[in-house]
Amino acid sequence: MKTLLTEAQLEFKNYIAEYLEKELKPYVKEIEGAHSFPMGFYKKLAKDRLLALNFPKHFGGQEYDCLRCAILIEEMAKLSSGVAGTVTTAGMTGPFLILDLGNEEQKETYLHGVATGETITAFGATEPNAGSDLTNIETIAIKEGGNYRINGSKTFCTNASVANIFIIITNTNPEGPRKEFTAFLLEKDTAGMKVGEKFDKMGWTCQDTAEVYLNDVVVPESSIIGSVGKGFNAAFSSINFTRIILAATAYGVCQAALQLAIEHSRNVKIGERPLIDQQGIRCEISDLATEIEAAGLLIYRAATLQDRKQNNRKEAAMAKYYATNLAKKVTKETMRMLGPEGYYKNGLAATFFLDSPVFTIADGTSEIQKENIAKGLKLAKPGQLGK
Amino acid sequence: MTELTKQQKDIKRAAKEFAQKEFDLFADDGDKSETYPKKLFKKATQLGFIGISIDEAYEGGGLGLIEQMLVLEEFWKVDAGCGNILFSSLGSEILLKYADEEQKRDFLPKIADGKLILGACVDYRSLENGVTFDKCDDQNYVLNGSYSFVLHGTLFDKVLVFASASGNEAGEDKRAAFLLDKDQKGISAEKMEGKLGVRSTDIGNLRIENVKAGKECIVGIENQGNEQLNSFTDLLCLYTCAQAIGLTEACLDRAKKYSSKRVQFGKPINHFQLVKYKLSEMISKLEICKSLSYKMAEEMQNDRYDQKMPAILSLFAKEMAVVAASETLQIHGGFGYIKETGIERLYRDAQFLNCFGIGQETAKLRIIEKS
């Protein structure tokens, strides 16, 4: 698409596209078929300095802005949104919380390893009874002298089986009238912490997701990220950034799926004429292409606001809501256009189709995004749903 | 809504009970390993679910298209892949209507008995343009082409093939329906593995190379091919409605149940308007689809139906099912995306309807054509 990107941004985009064509594309099937964290590719990214792009140079990062992070993920998602999602949580948004809110010791201990691929972060906020409503969490941490004793469980914990650090959101005031949310940083193999079996999911097969059980886990006070009662700051400090990146993932999938529909309509003939000769098909593609470019503009705008450090909650929500819903639509329509051929698992159309539903769920569902947009439009009172 | 007769209600209930009791054993395994539930098919045959719309004179159930629909609907409500076992008789409707007496006597009882499995194509491109025939003389024909996405595509004994006369002039449209034997020389079937959903269903691609067919292979008379294909297409539309109704009802059930139990922000999520809207949309579309498609089934049975309705309803039904599955998954959140809850299977199965049968473009054009 003709784009509003600057020349430097465009150059980065092309560089990434070429890089991934060579380093990811040939291995996508193998990676997704392995149903586990793509460690080989992840280390390769580390070696080529493409992890922790958004981190300070001090920690081996590139100090890249949100827009360029979005571009990297968009390009990656064109080949595999599962890989893109994994790289996002492990090497971009997960550890960003520590950067944002952690103390010096935590940063020095863990953050140098992010860019090198040695530190893989798992993020545990969601619980069986706390999804959209995180205030419902039941994992508790009770102060015992200089330590905290944590009990509870987390579900859909991304990267849980390969991570070496876990960010766990707890309630540190279970007895009191008001819950008090506090984030802890736990190392893997901490006594009492157990990672469950990986979930068998419909799509995003290389993205590792599991339950984490916390049974009398005792950690020193210094494991707290930020301060007591500020756990939601940890959970939400980079949420707009995260939403933009997931929107970019969906945007990449939209583009790649539409490309399949276009190729199919060019190649398949009804009688003598290619499908694309039919006005209905041609113009349906026009419709989708228009919506996809609109999604791109929303995403780039939200990212630009992020980089200007302007409030972008509404804009990030709009980009996320629009792009992720669109991905479901485009992947569904692409499969339909491909007809029976599209319905087979070895095809890209099927992969895109199976991957997309997670986009409208993760990092705030579409319903929550609509509430966020409503808040941005000043249509909802403070404290009304989806704080 | 169209009031069902007592007998229809009984059949619906029997189908429901059978599916709920028997599918469990096969559904998960079928979805995992893409195996066809042979034993289930046998049981369904013994209980008379196969060929229920075949006349009693030919040892069928002697019931109509509505009853056939109701069974398909109840089967799909429990598991789409297993539900498709009913299609071992897909095409018998055409035989019943068009075949000569001898063909009917030869084949229909065996179909009703589960001893003869019919293969039937559900890819509109193949149906229309896949196979051509040359007429050698008054008695002999040669067929060539490929017939893709045939239900029971490797297990069939006979396959119903719509072929157009080769060298048709533009605008000319000669077509004949053939009933070919699996063992006939020149027919080869390849199993299409790796389906996204309906994985218990046997789907295959057929290559048809210089297959010699005698006049006796033609269903009814040669020049009726177009009419027969037209009827077959409308039947596919009708069955699509039944499948979509079954799947949407399954979605609605699951969505209702989960949303009444799942508490977020201090109340069950079915107290939120956005969730209520999703449910009310499913309920509304189901009512519309059910009453119109039962009416259509009845009229088709009497061979006096509004010709544009099958395409209209199949378009509506496909969209209904796909949206319902998508929203049901959304209501379940992350739990909908993991395999153990079975919600994602509904999402995969629904998309079968969107990819097979007559496509959206074809349906839209048919509506104009028949209006």
Image: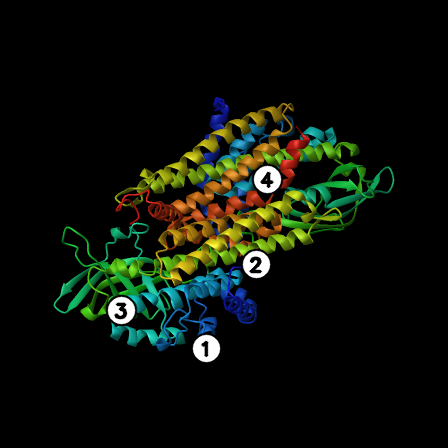
Can you say whether A248 is above or below B21 in the image?
A: below
Please give the residue where the numbered disc 1 appears in the rendered image: A47
| Mark 4 neighbour class, 10 Å CA radius: few under 14, some 14 to 19, many 20 or more | many
Can you say whether B229 is above or below A290 in the image?
A: above
Identified by mark 4, the residue type is Phe
Q: Secondary structure at mark 1?
A: helix
Distance of label 1 from label 2 (alpha carbons): 32 Å
Can you say whether B347 is above or below B16 in the image?
A: below
State the mark number for residue A102.
Answer: 3
Identified by mark 3, the residue type is Gly
Residue A36 position, x and y percent, is 44, 65
| Mark 3 neighbour class, 10 Å CA radius: few under 14, some 14 to 19, many 20 or more | many
Can you say whether A304 is above or below B164 in the image?
A: below
Depth check: B274 or B16 in front?
B274
Whichever of labels 1 and 2 marks the residue nearer the N terminus, that label is 2
Same chain for mark 4 and mark 3? The answer is: no
Same chain for mark 4 and mark 1? The answer is: no
The quadrant holding residue A99 is bottom left
Same chain for mark 1 and mark 3? The answer is: yes
The quadrant holding residue B233 is top right
